[in-house]
Image (spheres, helix red, strand yellow):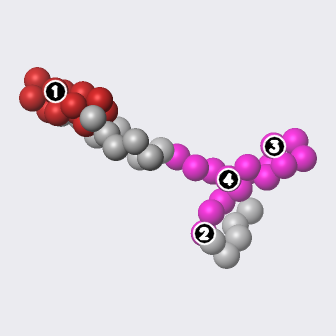
Amino acid sequence: MLHGTGITYTLQGDYYVPNFTLPAEEKTKSIGVWGQRHCRYLKEHRKAS
């Protein structure tokens, strides 16, 4: 089934479920020791709201 949005659907039981696929995972890069320390600093010193 195809609606005006361009998304295809599959009937499963009484419901139509959209056929979504996830994009291929990209390789992540390590942020290094200084990036980790900066992240920790931001978490510990964020503004109280």
The residue under label 4 is: 18
The residue under label 1 is: 37
Which one is earlier in the sequence, the residue at label 2 or at label 4?
2
Instruction: Give neighbour class at mark 4: few <14, some 14-19, many 20+ (Cα, 10 Å).
Output: few
Seen from the viewer's position, the closer of residues 36 and 45 is 45
Q: Are marks 1 and 4 in contact (CB under 8 Å)?
A: no
Q: Confirm whether residue 2 shows in the render.
A: yes
Quadrant where the image shows the N terminus: bottom right
Q: Position of residue 29 (x, y in %)?
A: 18, 33
Amino acid marked by disc 2: Gly
Question: Does 8 appear in magenta?
Answer: yes
Q: Position of residue 23 (x, y in %)?
A: 41, 46
Question: Which of label 3 and label 1 is nearer to you?
Answer: 1
Q: Which mark is residue 6?
A: 2
**Start and end of the magenta stretch?**
6-21
Give me the residue at 16% from left, 27% from top: 37
**Can you tell which quarter of the image residue 41 is in?**
top left
Which one is earlier in the sequence, the residue at label 2 or at label 1?
2
Q: Position of residue 30 (x, y in %)?
A: 17, 29
The answer to whether residue 17 is left or right of residue 48 is right
Amino acid marked by disc 1: Arg
The residue under label 3 is: 12
For numbered disc 4, what is the local secondary structure? strand
Seen from the viewer's position, the closer of residues 45 and 1 is 45
For numbered disc 1, what is the local secondary structure? helix
Q: Label 3 to label 1, Cα distance in Å?
A: 48 Å
Give me the residue at 17% from left, 33% from top: 38
Which one is earlier in the sequence, the residue at label 4 or at label 3?
3
Question: Does 14 appear in magenta?
Answer: yes
